[in-house]
Image: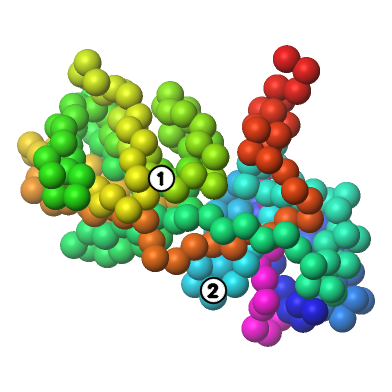
Amino acid sequence: MMKSVELVVHDSRPDALEFAEKFSDQLEAAGISTSGDPDVVMALGGDGTMLAAVQRAIDLDIPVLGFNLGTIGFLSSVDVSDVDRVIEALSSNDFLVSERSILHAKTKKGKAMGLNDVVVEKIDSQRLVQLRVSIDDEPFLTYRCDGLIAATPTGSTAYTFSSGGPLVDPEVEAILLSPVAAHSLFDRTMVLPANRTLKIIVERDRPVRVSVDKVDLGVLEEGDSVEVRTAAVTVRFLALDVTSFPQSVTEKFGLAGL
């Protein structure tokens, strides 16, 4: 039995706060605490809330489960109609478990881990930046662009996708490298083996901002760099039912019947 749950709630949404209050009461009635040392983190909201819950799961080395109260909710596996089944699964410790790779980013100012992506983006909206990339210390390309995205397969459905990148099944072990608005002939996403290490170096006097799952990691100046690699740890996702990646894509993007 999972005896304690930590809830991460989208606190600016009344529906999420209302659901959290009711769900907490139901958990307590089933003998499951919402305080103390948690056995699982649960997100109540959309994908943004789920990313915050993933950070807690990484810090605590426990699994994560997401209730989708948003729109697409690609990272969440259950919704409010599944409450009774979730409580039953908590009581019997009977969940399906899948492991997702995460990225580790390091600069001279700090380091962080994230589920979706590491984004290096221009600060001055009027000027392109110049970013030099090496892969396992081997020089690759210098991009003149608005930014670069390093993503996991899980993150391929997020910013990388909106930048024209491919959808990659989370079971694939890979790192994706995508330019944002590249001013060059080569503007395609690179799909690399997960054991590669990327180094992105800022060239010219045009600073960039680095973020990991939308959390600010600071500003890089000319000559500074960020190193991105697959982390040694993973995040465990819980689910009630088996859902294939193609099925998730058709359901979440409303493609069924096309």
Q: Is residue 139 above or below residue 66?
A: above
How crowded pointer 1 is (Cα within 10 Å; few <14, some 14-19, many 20+) is rated as many
Q: Residue placed at 61% from the left, 53% from the top?
A: 49
Q: Which residue is more in the foreground, 49 or 139?
A: 139
Residue 94 lies, in percent from the top left, at 80, 67
Question: Does residue 5 show up?
Answer: yes
Q: Which residue does the numbered mark 2 point to in the structure image?
A: 61
Q: Quadrant of residue 133?
A: top left
Residue 25: image location, x then y, percent: 87, 71
- Residue type at mark 2? Asp
The magenta span reads 35-46
**Residue sitting at 22 percent across and 63 percent down?**
109
Mark 1: which secondary structure?
strand
Q: Position of residue 189 (x, y in %)?
A: 35, 29
Which residue is labeled 1 in the image?
A: 174
Q: Is residue 139 left or right of residue 217?
A: left
Circles 1 and 2 in contact, beta carbons < 8 Å: no
